[in-house]
Amino acid sequence: MKSKLLVLSGCLVLAMNSCRSDTENASIDHTTSKLNGTTIHKLSINGNYTYVNEINGEYFYADDITITSEQFNKLKMQANSELSTMEKSTIVSSFIKTWPNATVYYTLPSQGSLSTQNYNTFLTNINKAFEMISSQTSVQFIQRTNQTEYITFTYSTSTNSSPLGWGKNTVNGIKIYNITYPAIIAHEVMHSMGIMHEQCRPDRDQYIIVDVNRAIEGSRHNFNLYNDYAGNGEFDFGSVMMYQSTDFAIDTSKPVMTKLDGSTFTKQRTALSAGDYAGINHLYGPVNATSAINGTYTLTTSLASDKNLDISGSTITDGVNIILNSASTGNNQKFTFTKSDHGYYIIKSSVDPTKVLTVKNSGTLNGTAVELRTNSNTDSQKWLLFNLGNNGFGFAPKNAPSLRLEVKDGLTTNLTPIVIGSTDTTVQPYTKQRFKLTKVN
């Protein structure tokens, strides 16, 4: 994708040594350097370096991904060595948000400097991009009336870029240079939906070798390892979100990325792959209004594929414990997800939909039991879903956002209590805190 850094690439290497100045922060592992008017932020998060380029007060998480100053500050907080992992875990939950009810509102661009023919092409391809995404997912694109959160488009003479994810009372301004490519427009729209680049998923080292030393100075942010993102399915070389081996390379004979066997690969920008659709459906599938109301799921622990969350004794009495039990087809192991506050869900029992998963006595301590109780819309009955990609989902109660739903002591014996417990990592929690959702009807 054409961008400012690519336009400047001819002079970046020559300017490397004369344009850099570093500063350090004692408690935050954060180094900054200057390069031709760009401030390059280098942050150490969970043992990996994350780069953010700041240009005229705008923060670039990649060449085509912008983040807000609030999101940047959350990254800096993650790099703060004095923060506990529980505090960092809470920070991550608010870094990227999906669109409520899987509905993206938008406005179309003005004609601006475009000719009438090019403007009509732009409009046509925006709609093709929407259709491309929605054709095999639950995501809807609706033209804005009075909504405060929406995306809008601007023709750019130099770049394709998008803000990252949904933001409250926020307009996501998407810039498009390649107006004749619907899939490139879809790529940027997917960034606004909270979807990252494929080469940056945290398990990428199992599939590719990334040598950032071969990348043009100032372009390393395109290869960040996203600690707040989970890949879904096998690594997808055909994803519309994937870059190719030689992108941003100083010397194209020395690619930045190769497969494990040393071979190179190209990118495609013609259509979404099957993996792209699967990823969107994993991210938005159980959280849109329709499927949340009509869909019924089992919650299987990642500790054992034959053990599900279960209502003890199949009773519906207030205060009955939620336990782990052998998988069955009974309603005592079936739950529906209903939207609550944005990002939070009430988990209803199929035995009695008036009863929901609840943190006992609204507790906030490690090891507090989870029980079934009449829905009273309290924070102890609202659960934030963390998309863990291939590892399913994690759940954080709103009354204790740093804790996670877990199988007590990581046991797999029947009748093991389900509790809330602390986590030592932000995205991939303990196995006992991971659950697979399986739609059963």
Image (cartoon, rainbow, N blue to C red):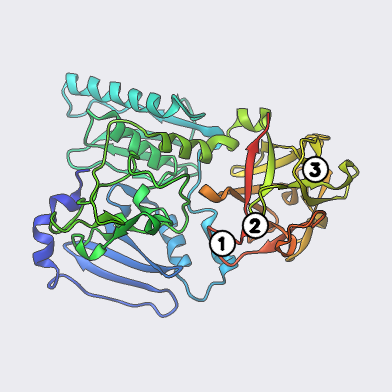
- Badge 3 amino acid: Ser
Q: CA distance from mark 1 to mark 3?
A: 27 Å
What residue is rendered at 38% in x and 26% in y?
Answer: 132
Estimate the x, y position of residue 245 in percent, counting from the top left: 23, 51
Circles 1, 2 touching at the beta carbon (< 8 Å)? no
What residue is rendered at 33% in x and 23% in y?
Answer: 128
Q: Quadrant of residue 236?
A: top left
Estimate the x, y position of residue 72 in percent, counting from the top left: 40, 59
Q: Nearer the viewer, residue 110 or 155?
A: 155
Q: Quadrant of residue 187?
A: top left
Sequence-wise first label, 1 or 2:
1
Residue placed under numbered mark 1 in the picture:
89
**Looking at the rendering, in which quadrant would you find the C terminus?**
top right
- Badge 1 amino acid: Ser
Tell which tag, 1 or 3, sits nearer the viewer: 1
What residue is rendered at 23% in x and 43% in y?
Answer: 266
Element type at marker 3? Answer: loop
Estimate the x, y position of residue 158 in percent, counting from the top left: 18, 42
Question: Is 244 above or below relative to 431?
Answer: above
Residue 230 in sight in this render: yes
- Badge 2 amino acid: Gln
Question: Is 124 above or below relative to 171?
Answer: above
Q: Residues within 10 Å of mark 2 (few under 14, many from 20)?
A: many
**Looking at the rendering, in which quadrant would you find the N terminus?**
top left
Q: Nearer the viewer, residue 399 or 328?
A: 328
Question: Is 201 above or below relative to 126?
Answer: below
Element type at marker 1? Answer: helix
Sequence-wise first label, 1 or 3:
1
Residue placed under numbered mark 2 in the picture:
433
